Image (spheres, rainbow, N blue to C red):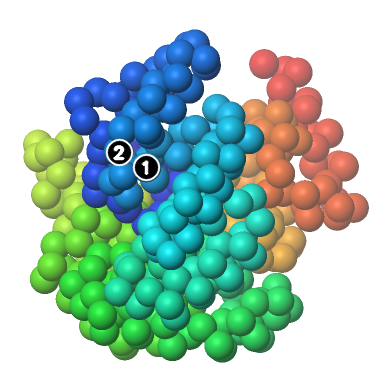
Amino acid sequence: MLKRSLGFLIGLMSLSLLIATQLPGNFEQQIKESTDKSAALALIVQYAETTDDLNDLRILQNHWLRLDRESCVKHFQALADKHPKDPKYIYLNARTAADTAVRKSTGRRLVKDYPDFEPGYQMLLSYYQNNLFTTPGAKHPSAQPFMKDYKADKKFFQQYMDRFPDNENALYLQIQRLIWEQDTRNANLLVAKALRLDASWLNWQFYTDFYLRTKQFVLLQAYIHSLIDTAAAYKNATQQEKEDFFEEDYFLTLMVGKAYEEAVDWFEQHPRLFSKPYLRKELLKANVLLGRMDKAFSLLDNELAVGSDWSDWLQDEEALQALKQDPRWYSHIERFLRIKQSD
């Protein structure tokens, strides 16, 4: 839920698909907590020999690859050779490949040859989720290496939805595609469908990511407001305290989502935020990242006037690199160092 520091918005622009399964009992926990690599590996190999369940094998494979990639690759290659027409083993074998292009080509093969095998769509379309949809847009140079394949495979997003209309992963991947293509209207319609289906990934991280990337800031404000109003942590807070919390959390959400222009505007419209030094640091970062150097140095002058001991933070903060290239930096940092030395 909400925390004062906003550390909860980690990995904002890159959600993972969920797999709703787990191995019997505390088997997986034993693997995770084992300090003996050989013992953990033996447990994995032993269990892998006793099951043909795809989800169990997928989870075992994840841990096996981490502990001993070579033996894992050999095991699933052997299974694929033994069952050359079984999409399950074709899929599992491709998952061991370090080269994402192998997963793309195998996913395409699975979708075309075994159109009712749902994981094949996941394998193919996740390739675009993890690569193309992390770029700023179709015309950006970083998107160009993926565009030819995407144009050929784009139809499979809808095919996935048509064959598995209530599948959470199909919905999620289609929504990510629509966000990237800036088709907010249809993305909103699918989010509404996901809400009706009570999709497991409809959580704080998804909604904030979704509203930030589609620039639906009014909806983002309403969502954060609703969280504060219903959070147990704020049940004894006054309405004014809740509003104060909202102003801070919304600003920090904009910062973590890199919506710097909106963050600066919000901050300046809510002067109470200036009373918090850690929020003023974020404001300084936003102005630097927007290239507003005159404003950034004006903010530094304010901190010097009140005697803020910011010298260490200013020198260590990576987001301020552009500030340090400005000729005005040296005189300012010297004055901050004097404040530190006087304490």
Percent across and percent down for residue 219 are 27, 72
Q: Secondary structure at mark 2?
A: loop
- Percent position (x, y) of residue 320? 72, 48
Q: Amino acid at mark 2?
A: Thr
Residue 301: horizontal and vertical position, in percent? 69, 47
The picture quadrant where one finds residue 43 is top left
- Determine the residue positioned at 38% across, 25% down: 46
From the image, tell me which residue sits under label 1.
57
Image point 52% across, 16% down: which residue?
A: 37
**Tags 2 and 1 touching, CB below 8 Å:** yes
What amino acid is found at the position of numbered circle 1 in the picture? Answer: Leu
Q: Is residue 77 left or right of residue 230?
A: right
Classify residue 161 by image quadrant. Answer: bottom left
Question: Image quadrant for the C terminus?
Answer: top right
The alpha-carbon separation of the residues under discs 2 and 1 comes to 7 Å
Determine whether 61 is above or below 107 in the image.
Answer: above
31 vs 272, nearest the viewer: 31
Looking at this view, is 305 or 48 the one in front? Answer: 48
Residue 282 position in % (x across, y down): 55, 49
Q: Which mark is residue 2?
A: none
Q: Between residue 46 and residue 40, name the one nearer to us.
A: 46
Which disc, if any, is residue 51?
Answer: 2
